[in-house]
Image (cartoon, grey):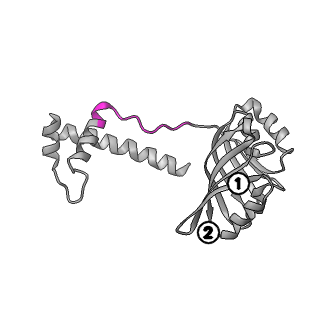
Amino acid sequence: MTISVQHEGCWTSNLGDVDASTVNYQVYPERDYLRSRITVYPKDKSVVLRMKRSRGVLKINKATSYGDVYFVDFLNRYRDSLAGWLYDKEVMFLFNRIWRGTETWGFVIPRDRVSEILGEVSSYGKLVNYTLEDFKLNLGPRLSPAERRALKTAFSRGYLDYPRKADADTVAMELGLSKVTFLHHLRNAYRKLTVHYLNSDLS
């Protein structure tokens, strides 16, 4: 599920025309704060100053410049925050992005709790949009032991380098396979990895 919310009075409403994304955060409900780490693009020092003055931001631990991006480590209030509310709902977080005062959260919940989320989120701000889609956990392609051995040995021996440091006959001999069998396993591994990458990219 993805929700986009305009949370007036929150520090997120003071960012202006920058693109911010949460890298990670730690929650301390018993102390009523979260430690958040976000990236801010394009780099704008005034954004950090506005965050310092925002209601809900308790402390800026560090603001570091990396090229044209700011990395901001800060503490913000747990109570009355969307992050705190979603944490209390025990959702599985996927991502968080802030753009022009709108917070977009992606997370996983059972379908029978969608109405509950939509019913309560309005107490934290204006719900701009939401989307629902089935969550698919993609752990990567399943290579057979033979395919993994062929790929690992080809990589370690430099068969995949350009120019090649070893030819197919040499790698096949090390594996105790014929050249044809080695190439069969290697190409199967290529195909599975390529399909996985393309499907991930399209999604």
Question: Residue 37 in magenta?
Answer: no
Percent across and percent down for residue 113 are 76, 32
Magenta-colored segment: predominant secondary structure:
loop
Q: Pointer 2: what residue?
A: 43
Q: Pointer 1: what residue?
A: 59
At 24% from the left edge and 55% from the top edge, which residue is drawn?
Answer: 161
Residue 100 makes an appearance in the image: no
In this rendering, would 96 be left or right of 81? left
Q: In the rendered image, which quarter is residue 187 located in?
A: top left
Residue 149: mark in rendering: none
In the image, what residue type sits under mark 1? Lys
Residue 151 vertical placement versus 16 (above, below): above
Percent across and percent down for residue 9 are 83, 56
How far apart are the alpha carbons under marks 1 and 2? 19 Å
In this view of the protein, which residue sits in the foreground, 74 or 142?
74
Q: Identify the secondary structure beneath mark 1.
A: strand
Report the magenta residues as a range. 137-148
In the image, what residue type sits under mark 2? Lys
